[in-house]
Image (spheres, grey):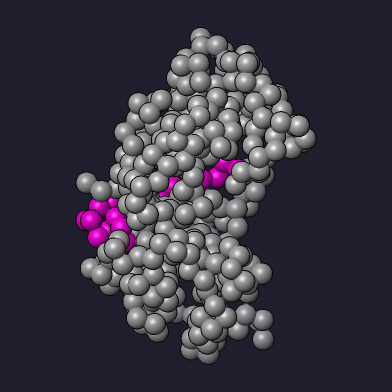
Amino acid sequence: MTRGRFAPSPTGALHVGNARSALLAWLHARAAGGRFVMRVEDLDFGRVRPGYMERQLDELHWLGLDWDEGPDVGGPHAPYVQSQRQPLYEAALRRLAEMGMLFACTCSRRDIAGAASAPHVGEEGPRYPGTCRDRRVQAGPGSLTDFGRSQFALRVAAPSGPIPFTDELLGPCAFDPADEGDFVVRRKDGVAAYQLAVVVDDAAMRITDVVRGADLLSSTARQILLYRALELPEPRFLHVPLMLGPDGERLAKRHGAVSLGELRDAGVPADAVAGWLASTCGLAEPGERLHPSRLIERFNVARLPVEPTVVTEADLRLLRSTDAVFRPDGA
Ligand code: GLU
């Protein structure tokens, strides 16, 4: 049985690019007759904003998506909010420590940025220069907590060498985890980091197909490394293209009111938004309006674009003029 998921971070409003990824993940699961899971990734406490989880879920429902398991509906793998799942991450960290894969790192961001041997700037900032690599965490009771919750991050000593995988849309891919450097699996505040939490949760929730934005493509290699180390079954991966603004930059607030909530508040009907999103990826005709359920039969991975979608001013104008009620300047 196919099990798909969407895993939003409640750090801000869902923009139309996020909404399209959610729609495609949902269609992928539903077209296979599978189940769909909603999981909220709220571990980035500094960026999580109160009320956004509820807002995001509400907006996705408005768009016409539903889910069989999630924070608001429960399910056999509850809780579906990552901040409530820390014991699972701790267990995985202990296993990684037993395998000698973790080291305790005291470096600050400034240390890393300033290290003379850190010339490489990866997708996620300067590559970790390996300063603390020799401080391997010893396996054994209490070893993780002995290192203190407040002073040490735990990093995986990333082996070098490409990890190949097949993306269901993009075909054969390979990334070397060492390119981004040794990565954090538990932050200095004691909380699990994204790369670990996503693997533990997708495995625990029996996710068979991870459909998400292409910004996470290179993370997949690090995640596969963790699946293998933890002896967890690897899901299939499908990375959908990002949506870019008219200037070719990743879609952001500055491109105008492109969040789902703003469209809704302005009175643009959900089926116009769903139809437009589908039209940007070959699943609907321009101007078509439909409920996402009507796309299930049409869904076909082969029809999806592999290149990012540039949202032009004309697209935005068209969407904004739907029923002539949406005015981005609030006029
Ligand atoms: N929570 C991540 C995000 O909002 C997505 C993680 C994933 O889909 O693997 O970017």
Q: Is residue 35 visible?
A: yes
Residue 102, x across and y down, in percent: 55, 21
Q: In this view of the protein, which residue sits in the foreground, 212 or 164?
A: 164
In this rendering, position of residue 178 left or right of residue 329: left
The residue segment tinted magenta is 27-44
**Residue in the picture at 51% in, 35% down:** 177
Residue found at the very far bottom of the displayed protein: 324
- Quadrant of res 165: top left
- Determine whether 169 is above or below 62 in the image: above
- Determine whether 275 is above or below 306 in the image: below
- Point out the image quarter for the C terminus: bottom right
**Residue in the picture at 42% in, 42% down:** 174
Task: Specify whether residue 41 is painted magenta.
Answer: yes
Task: Specify whether residue 128 is painted magenta.
Answer: no
Q: How many numbered discs, if any?
A: 0
Residue found at the very far top of the displayed protein: 140
Residue 25, x across and y down, in percent: 37, 57
Residue 57, x across and y down, in percent: 47, 58
Q: Is residue 90 visible?
A: no
- Determine whether 241 is above or below 227 in the image: below
In this rendering, position of residue 240 left or right of residue 56: left
- Quadrant of res 132: top right
Residue 292, x across and y down, in percent: 33, 69
**Residue in the picture at 37% in, 54% down:** 170
**Residue in the picture at 54% in, 50% down:** 9
Q: In this view of the protein, which residue sits in the foreground, 17 or 306?
A: 306
